[in-house]
Image (cartoon, helix red, strand yellow):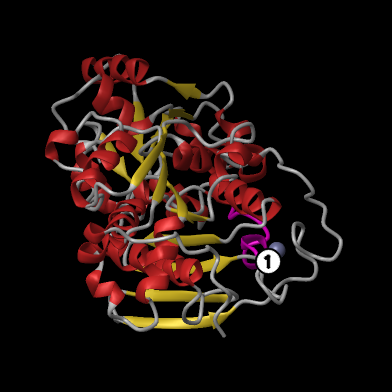
Amino acid sequence: MPFPPLVEPAEELTVDEVRRYSRHLIIPDVGMSGQKRLKNSKVLVIGAGGLGSPALLYLAAAGVGTLGIIDFDEVDESNLQRQVIHGQSDIGKSKAVSARESIAEINPLVEVIVHEERLDNDNVMAIFEPYDLIVDGTDNFATRYLVNDAAYFLQKPYIWGSIYRFDGQASVFWPHAPGGEAPCYRCLYPEPPPPGMVPSCAEGGVLGVLCASIGSIQVNEAIKLLTGIGEPLVGKLMIYDALEMEYRKLRVRKDPGCALCGEHPTVTQLIDYDTFCGAVSTEAADAAAGSTISVTELEHMLKERDEGSRDFVLVDVREPNEFEINRIPGSILIPKGEFLNGNALEQLPAVDSGKQVVLHCKSGVRSAEALAVVKGAGYSDAVHVGGGVVAWVNQIDPSQPSY
Ligand SMILES: [Zn+2]
């Protein structure tokens, strides 16, 4: 059952607009009235990245009158594999500004509002307030819970998408939707996954074109809600498997016990989302405290090892694919999963050999988790490398590629 349109129609379309949007105008369900509603719509897209790129391009081309973009990041060469709103000449430029320039080229009739800041508890309500709905293109859990809660407090639809390797998901969370039966993000995911358990796109990889598949579903849902057509993805979870080429739709029910939208809510205002989601687990943070070395220290240690005045084993806990892209010379590969299942310990020097164990990963989260295991097994002088191979490439060996 379609919901009533979220937005009232603009008074009129100009001759230019009629020409531009003619392929929409001749669809009976959209027509003049639907296009006028889009013209009057204000949509906020969080992140001009993998999902935000196709979302912004299609929202702009469709004639959504006002588009907000939140992004504080800059365009990096490794973004161009999927973030198609940016080009080669945009490298180093603010993503929000680069996206605004692309939109101006596609549809100069769209008003673009750029928010070049990190979304946080202090600014989220004021930023969200003027928009009709929120399209989320972020890839971290702290921001997702923040967006979900703020959208709930402001009673706005939250169009969520998620991508990982060949798998994508999308849904519309809107407990205030007509009928009052719809769930929020917390109803589906009451708790964030344990830190370090779910790799981000930066750590796990994503097939570039998957962003278009999921980003376009998000735009599709935005257009349906704004104009009041079709069956919105409210209370449903869309799951897409690009390898099997399979879309599945599951029903998601409102959880009466939901901390936010349930019968006895415990989250009644914005909370501390970084603490809620945790950058690393408590065990990992405890293990890393006082046992973290810098890449400069590691370089020095490697030199001493080469000279024979020091002995230690340097273990890269990333995945084999990552090890192929770049590595710290003299490291051996034992993926983090091997530490968690206990198999890694057989591959390490014996505890009483006196040989120190040094762990590293991409940025220091996974190696901290592995460090907790290693220390628990008795390697009391084990350390991990803060900043991981990213810091190594940036500070010690810029000739290697980063990812
Ligand atoms: Zn809920």
* Rendered-image quarter of ligand 1: bottom right
Q: Choose top left, top right, bottom left or bottom right for residue 148.
A: bottom right
Q: Position of residue 103 (x, y in %)?
A: 26, 47
Quick check: 155 left or right of 15?
A: right
Q: Does the magenta stretch include residue 192?
A: yes
Q: Where is residue 361 in the image (x, y as percent from the top left)?
A: 37, 39
At x 18%, y 24%, the residue is 398
Taking depth in this image into account, of 356 and 140 the one nearest to the observer is 140
Q: Where is residue 399 in the image (x, y as percent from the top left)?
A: 13, 27
Crowd class of label 1 (few under 14; some 14 to 19; many from 20; radius 10 Å):
many
Give the quadrant of the N terminus.
bottom right
Q: Is the magenta stretch mostly helix, strand or loop?
A: loop
Taking depth in this image into account, of 150 and 156 the one nearest to the observer is 156
Q: Choose top left, top right, bottom left or bottom right for residue 184.
A: bottom right
Decide if residue 264 is in sight here. yes
Look at the numbered disc 1 and say if its residue's Cβ is closer than 8 Å to ligand 1: yes
Q: Position of residue 185 (x, y in %)?
A: 61, 61
Q: Does the magenta stretch include residue 179?
A: no
Q: Residue under circle 1?
A: 175
- Residue type indicated by callout 1: Pro
Which element carries disc 1, helix, strand or loop?
A: loop
Write the start and end of the magenta stretch as one range: 184-194
Quick check: 139 left or right of 119?
A: left
Give the quadrant of the C terminus.
top left
Taking depth in this image into account, of 128 and 53 the one nearest to the observer is 128
